[in-house]
């Protein structure tokens, strides 16, 4: 590689080589940069050892109180630096083995900025094995799956602080409540594990994550603990006006007990599925149209009229389907008590279902999640990004024209 003091002939030869193979130009620059960095770092390490010993090389001190400790050659180690590559460093050492560098810490193999990049690749959906495969090309050295996992564990403190953050500064009026299953490694087995999700809507109509917690979504007692935990973190129960959910066992009862001022909106999509499951295939489209007349009516009174017609038309033909709708109809029409521009967002749990789909999409490359803590790291990262996007799209904004499209003929 050429240096500034090289003569014209040498520079000309290098220029000729670059012109014949232009893609090698930056490799040559990188080689020079690595060489300069290696020399600079070794020089600093030697100064650090001199400071530790209290004397320069070859310098003798009378009445040496340092137990006659001396320099003892060096050993080679590699250290990877972002945007530069892997450095081969001759690390000086002392005879007694007491010297430990603060510049180049023991067992560290790459700089801290690379740790952040590794963590971001993992959180963005790449598996530990995938990162290991591409790391040689991206950063100049192979990162083992074990190293990736170790780096990601250091993120857990910050992730956990966000997941369990105080909620006292938020005024929450609505809550979307549901759970989603993930394939997770528990001990030596693979199990389907639910993650319970609660999304809140603030008084300014912005959506925020309130809970991401592993637990049994079919257990009423588990949901009660979830609600109590949110209140212990500062959530004010008196501000909660509505809970949107899909009718999980015991959930509605527990919700009403923990938030006595709130009403319940049962997801119309889930109710429709339950009703249609009790209808013959040839009649499904017809019944679905009738359900749509009920759920997208222009007012609650109109919805009730359509409901009565539904009962009259199908009670003798599909009694089980009609009973299923009767049991849910009041909870399905709660949204009419709230602002019209918000109706389309309050009818169903679509807000939280879209979050579940994003969770699944981003974790699909991993296939199996490596335990509860690993799951929290990934999902919280996704949740934070979603929250940033939600700031630009408050609940109900621009929804009224869409709503009118469905209700103009009802």
Image: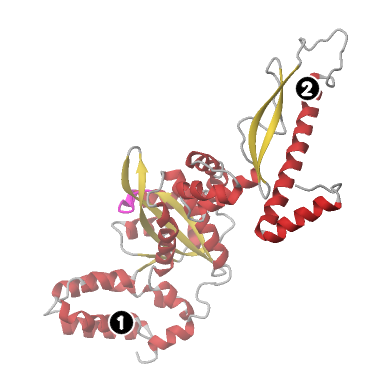
Gap between marks 1 and 2 measured at Cα? 80 Å
Quarter-wise, where is residue 67 in the image?
top right
Q: Specify few, some or many for label 1: CA neighbours under 10 Å numbering under 14, 14-19, or 20 or more.
A: some
Location of residue 319 in the rendering, given as x and y in whole percent from the top left corner: 14, 75
- Secondary structure found at label 1: helix
Q: Specify few, some or many for label 2: CA neighbours under 10 Å numbering under 14, 14-19, or 20 or more.
A: some
Location of residue 117 in the rendering, given as x and y in whole percent from the top left corner: 59, 50
Residue 386 vs 370, above or below: the answer is below
Magenta segment boundaries in residue numbering: 215-221
Q: In screen coordinates, is 274 left or right of 246?
A: left
Name the residue rendered at 54%, 48% in the picture: 135
Mark 1 and mark 2 residues within 8 Å of each other at the beta carbon = no
Name the residue rendered at 71%, 15% in the picture: 95
Q: In screen coordinates, is 390 left or right of 78?
A: left
Magenta-highlighted stretch: main secondary structure? loop
Most foreground residue, 352 or 253: 352
Give the quadrant of the C terminus. bottom left
Q: In screen coordinates, is 161 left or right of 307?
A: right
- Find disc 1 in the rendering and name its residue: 292
- Find disc 2 in the rendering and name its residue: 52
Residue 163 vs 406, above or below: the answer is above
Residue 363 in view = yes
* Residue 8 belongs to the span the image colors magenta: no
Q: Give the mark nearer the N terminus: 1 vs 2.
A: 2
- Secondary structure found at label 2: helix
Query: Which labelled disc corresponds to residue 1?
Result: none
Name the residue rendered at 48%, 55% in the picture: 125
Most foreground residue, 112 or 13: 13
Location of residue 123 in the rendering, given as x and y in whole percent from the top left corner: 51, 52
Name the residue rendered at 57%, 59% in the picture: 170
């Amino acid at each position: 590689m050429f240096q500034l003091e090289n003569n014209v002939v040498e520079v000309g030869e290098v220029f000729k080589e670059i012109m014949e193979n232009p893609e090698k130009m930056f490799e040559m620059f990188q080689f020079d940069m690595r060489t300069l960095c290696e020399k600079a770092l070794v020089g600093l390490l030697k100064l650090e050892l001199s400071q530790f010993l209290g004397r320069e090389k070859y310098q003798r001190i009378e009445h040496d109180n340092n137990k006659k400790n001396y320099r003892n050659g060096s050993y080679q180690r590699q250290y990877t630096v972002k945007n530069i590559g892997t450095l081969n460093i001759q690390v000086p050492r002392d005879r007694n083995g007491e010297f430990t560098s603060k510049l180049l810490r023991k067992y560290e193999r790459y700089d801290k900025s690379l740790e952040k990049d590794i963590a971001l690749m993992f959180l963005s959906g790449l598996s530990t094995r995938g990162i290991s495969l591409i790391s040689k090309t991206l950063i100049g050295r192979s990162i083992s799956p074990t190293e990736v996992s170790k780096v990601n564990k250091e993120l857990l403190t910050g992730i956990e602080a966000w997941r369990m953050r105080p909620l006292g500064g938020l005024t929450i009026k609505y809550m979307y409540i549901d759970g989603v299953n993930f394939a997770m490694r528990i001990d030596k087995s693979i199990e389907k594990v639910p993650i319970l999700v609660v999304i809140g809507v603030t008084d300014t109509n912005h959506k925020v994550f309130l809970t991401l917690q592993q637990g049994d979504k079919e257990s009423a007692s588990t949901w009660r603990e979830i609600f109590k935990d949110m209140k212990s973190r500062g959530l004010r129960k008196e501000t909660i006006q509505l809970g949107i959910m899909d009718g999980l066992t015991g959930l509605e009862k527990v919700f009403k007990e923990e938030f006595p001022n709130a009403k319940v909106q049962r997801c119309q999509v889930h109710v429709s599925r339950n009703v249609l499951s009790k209808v013959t295939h040839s009649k499904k489209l017809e019944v679905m149209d009738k359900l749509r007349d009920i759920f997208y009516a222009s007012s609650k009174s109109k919805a009730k009229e359509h409901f009565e017609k539904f009962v009259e038309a199908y009670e003798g033909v599909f009694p089980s389907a009609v009973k299923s709708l009767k049991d849910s109809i009041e909870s399905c029409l709660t949204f009419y008590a709230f602002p019209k521009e918000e109706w389309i967002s309050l009818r169903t749990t679509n807000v939280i279902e879209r979050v579940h789909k994003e969770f699944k999409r981003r974790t699909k490359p991993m296939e199996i999640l490596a335990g509860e803590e690993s799951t929290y790291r990934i999902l919280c990262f996704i949740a934070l990004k979603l929250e940033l996007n939600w700031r630009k799209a408050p609940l109900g904004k621009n929804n009224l024209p869409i709503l009118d499209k469905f209700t103009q003929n009802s």
